[in-house]
Image (cartoon, rainbow, N blue to C red):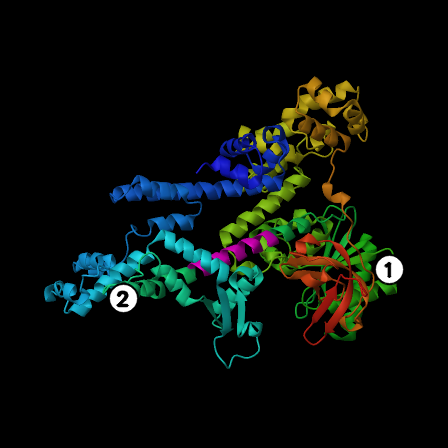
């Protein structure tokens, strides 16, 4: 298997591009660095292409490693042949390699191995010949031997059939044909495990039948979860007679001989006893793997826009973290996220006096700190807290001056109880830390959410059932891409944020923070070389993604890599501009001059030159600022207010295989089923139409207040 050729075919790119990416990865370059600063080498592949290519490269190398391991094992067993090696070389999946290896792989004792120990292999070989002159019973009499454990001719024949059955089961080509048949025609049947199980989320799977090839991933994962919980029974159903005929094909003679019946029975037994159970398991595992891979992709797809949500900058922000028993935690942070004030109020379930005290406290805090933005957590008592805050705004007549937004609390409690939170806010109670986190995640979602395990952010489906290593790798990749796409202020970033910068691990991140605390703010990227453990390779990888706002040279607050400073200065010199004069001008000037000719004059690649010009044109540019700002509220709507046909504007909070959940301001997200996302055209996946963070227009289809379910549509009524 030529890995380069396979990657070229799968990704539709040239060999030189694949070879360049492989070489860079093998040198230890990070994917963000390769995507941003090595465009000429790989032909400007984007970060997602590079990540997919890297993942596939790892998978193909694992297949190649297993192929070599099996080949060496066959040689040690002294069964290796050129034909076997050719079969191994033709394999493109790990499952195919294991099928080739199956007949030779050391096995635990089986009925067939016991029969071989009893010397019944010659009898099995004789039966397989299906010689018309052979009397099977008479031949079997010659193998009766009490000392070997063969008490009768019937036992001898059974042992011979066991040997034939295992031989049939180990046939890689047959297994391949049966897998093709399963993929084409197998049906998944599910039913409740017990008749007396009460109504559950799995009731819809009782007496459910569906072609395996058509079963969507979210139903596979739901089915798996129900089976693990002991609520569902799941079967893979095929035409057994047809499968057995496939096993007999080429082994059972059309012109019957006395031994033909025994061979046929052995083939049938091979399928029922050996092949079907293992194929059922393999097909189920394959379905689950595909479903999990798809769910991981959906999770990663949802996570990216959540992390890249536009920050709300320059606003003093109040956060209210709702609660009953422990009250509502309140925190006020300044424009930079520095904590100004904290308290606990009891606006619900404590009577009128506590309510009035809460209103007075919040009003005073708003006035004292000139609060212009509020974040309200969506957890327990969130609806009542939102109503309380809206009442405060009305009483203060601040509806147009102080807007609020309901913010997902997902992960806030996890973070507030973590060591990182304790290190960051040792003076505050765990509950207060949660309120601070809520305020900050509205101000700068990326900087705050990177402190939280991505699995706790709440934008996936069945995340607790997914492969932990693969899920962590995918989500860490998304976080890494987002952090490096935005860039990081090296003088204010937390250890959590710095540790996601390309080339920076947690140790180096800690050392950067320690260095700036001991030596003051960084004034140039060159100072990073003085940070312990931040060597030349790490500096190469991270320098371009670290920003120094306020540095003497504006170039230090751009994405221009230090290795390109000379080219950047040459570009400025070409147009007789200083970095300050170049702002908002240099890109248009370079475009007019012609990037191609300019790149040749300056001896730099055109993609790199375009990036340099874009960065010098807007130093400190944050790509998130170009996205629509979040919608702020000043009043409350209740679920009971919703009526079928009502038109609303909402924010997409989660995208799953079966639809999108939209926040319409009633503390209960509504579901737009995949069938309701678009008129007149089939939607294969909701991600084709919406993504997390999108502002969408929806219409109410149905409201079930008792079950707290809201059905929405994005198909305009009448169309």
Which quadrant is home to the C terminus?
Answer: bottom right
Q: Which residues are magenta?
A: 282-299
Q: Which residue is mark 2?
A: 261
Q: Main secondary structure of the magenta part?
A: helix
Tell which residue pokes out farthest to the front in this image.
255
User: Is 12 placed above or below 160 here?
Assistant: above
Q: Position of residue 206 (x, y in %)?
A: 54, 74
Q: Secondary structure at mark 1?
A: loop
- Front residue of 255/521: it is 255
> Which of the 4 image quadrants contains residue 61?
top left
> Which of the 4 image quadrants contains residue 405?
bottom right
Q: Position of residue 232 (x, y in %)?
A: 49, 72
Q: Which mark is residue 176?
A: none
User: Is 336 placed above or below 240 here?
Assistant: above
Residue 293 is one of the magenta-drawn residues:
yes
Q: Earlier in the sequence, mark 2 or mark 1?
A: 2
> Does the image show residue 691?
no
Q: Which residue is mark 1?
A: 399
Q: CA distance from mark 2 to mark 1?
A: 87 Å
Q: Residues within 10 Å of mark 1 (few under 14, many from 20)?
A: some
- In the image, taking residue 191 as reference, residue 305 lies left or right, namely right
Q: Position of residue 267 (x, y in %)?
A: 32, 62
Q: Nearer the viewer, mark 2 or mark 1?
A: 2
Q: Position of residue 361 (x, y in %)?
A: 78, 63
Q: Residues within 10 Å of mark 2 (few under 14, many from 20)?
A: some
Q: Secondary structure at mark 2?
A: helix
- Front residue of 564/163: it is 163
Residue at coordinates 53% horizontally, 47% vertically from top-left?
473
Which quadrant is home to the N terminus?
Answer: top left
């Amino acid at each position: 298997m030529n890995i380069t050729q396979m990657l070229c075919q799968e990704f539709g790119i040239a060999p030189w591009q694949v070879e360049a990416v492989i070489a860079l990865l093998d040198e230890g370059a990070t994917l963000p660095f390769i995507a941003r600063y090595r465009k000429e080498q790989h032909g400007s592949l984007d970060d997602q292409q590079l990540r997919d290519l890297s993942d596939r490269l790892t998978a193909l190398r694992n297949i190649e490693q297993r192929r070599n391991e099996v080949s060496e094992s066959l040689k040690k067993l002294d069964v290796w042949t050129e034909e076997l090696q050719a079969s191994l070389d033709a394999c493109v999946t790990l499952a195919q390699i294991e099928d080739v290896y199956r007949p030779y792989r050391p096995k635990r004792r089986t009925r067939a191995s016991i029969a071989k120990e009893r010397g019944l292999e010659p009898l099995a070989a004789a039966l397989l010949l299906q010689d018309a002159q052979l009397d099977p019973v008479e031949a079997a009499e010659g193998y009766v031997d009490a000392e070997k454990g063969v008490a009768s001719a019937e036992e001898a024949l059974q042992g011979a059939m066991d040997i034939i059955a295992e031989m049939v089961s180990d046939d890689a080509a047959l297994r391949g044909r049966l897998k093709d048949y399963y993929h084409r025609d197998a049906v998944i049947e599910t039913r409740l495990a017990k008749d007396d199980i009460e109504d559950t989320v799995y009731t819809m799977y009782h007496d459910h039948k569906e072609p395996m090839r058509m079963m969507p991933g979210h139903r596979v994962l739901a089915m798996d979860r129900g089976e693990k919980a002991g609520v569902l029974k799941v079967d893979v159903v095929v035409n057994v007679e047809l499968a057995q005929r496939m096993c007999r094909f080429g082994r059972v003679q059309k012109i019957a001989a006395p031994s033909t019946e025994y061979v046929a029975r052995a083939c049938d037994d091979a399928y029922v006893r050996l092949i079907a159970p293992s194929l059922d398991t393999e097909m189920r595992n394959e379905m689950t793997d595909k479903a999990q891979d798809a769910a991981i992709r959906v999770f990663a797809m949802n996570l990216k826009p959540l992390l890249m949500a536009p920050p709300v900058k320059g606003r003093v922000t109040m956060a209210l973290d709702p609660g009953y028993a422990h009250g509502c935690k309140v925190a006020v942070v300044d424009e930079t996220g520095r904590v100004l004030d904290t308290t606990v109020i009891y606006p619900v379930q404590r009577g009128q006096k506590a309510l009035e005290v809460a209103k007075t406290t919040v009003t005073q805090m708003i006035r004292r700190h000139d609060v212009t933005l509020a974040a309200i957590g969506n957890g327990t008592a969130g609806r009542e807290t939102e109503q309380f805050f809206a009442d405060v705004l009305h009483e203060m007549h601040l509806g147009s001056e102080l807007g609020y937004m309901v913010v997902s609390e997902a992960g806030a409690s996890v973070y507030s109880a973590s060591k990182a939170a304790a290190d960051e806010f040792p003076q505050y109670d765990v509950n207060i830390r949660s309120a601070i986190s809520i305020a900050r995640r509205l101000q700068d979602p990326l900087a705050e959410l990177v402190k939280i395990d991505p699995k706790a952010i709440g934008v996936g489906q069945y995340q607790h059932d997914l492969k932990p290593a693969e899920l962590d790798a995918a989500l860490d990749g998304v976080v890494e891409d987002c952090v490096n796409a935005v860039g990081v202020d090296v003088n204010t970033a937390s250890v959590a944020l710095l540790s996601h910068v390309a080339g920076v691990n947690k140790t180096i991140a800690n050392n950067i923070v320690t260095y700036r605390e001991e030596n003051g703010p960084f004034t140039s990227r060159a100072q990073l070389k003085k940070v312990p453990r931040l060597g030349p390779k790490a500096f190469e990888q991270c320098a371009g993604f670290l920003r120094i706002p306020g540095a003497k040279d504006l170039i230090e607050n751009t994405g221009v890599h230090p290795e390109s400073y000379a080219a950047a200065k040459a570009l400025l010199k070409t147009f007789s501009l200083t970095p300050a004069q170049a702002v908002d001008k240099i890109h248009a000037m370079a475009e007019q001059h012609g990037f191609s000719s300019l790149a040749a004059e300056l001896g730099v690649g055109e993609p790199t030159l375009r990036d340099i010009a874009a960065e010098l044109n807007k130093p400190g540019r944050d790509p998130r600022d170009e996205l629509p700002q979040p919608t702020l509220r000043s009043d409350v709507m209740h679920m009971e207010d919703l009526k079928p046909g009502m038109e609303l504007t909402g924010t997409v909070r989660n995208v799953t295989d079966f639809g999108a959940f939209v926040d319409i301001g009633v503390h209960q997200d509504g579901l737009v089923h995949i069938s309701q996302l678009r008129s007149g055209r089939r939607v294969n996946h909701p991600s084709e139409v919406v993504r997390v963070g999108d502002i969408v227009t929806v219409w109410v289809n149905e409201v079930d207040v008792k079950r707290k379910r809201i059905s929405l549509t994005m198909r305009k009524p009448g169309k």
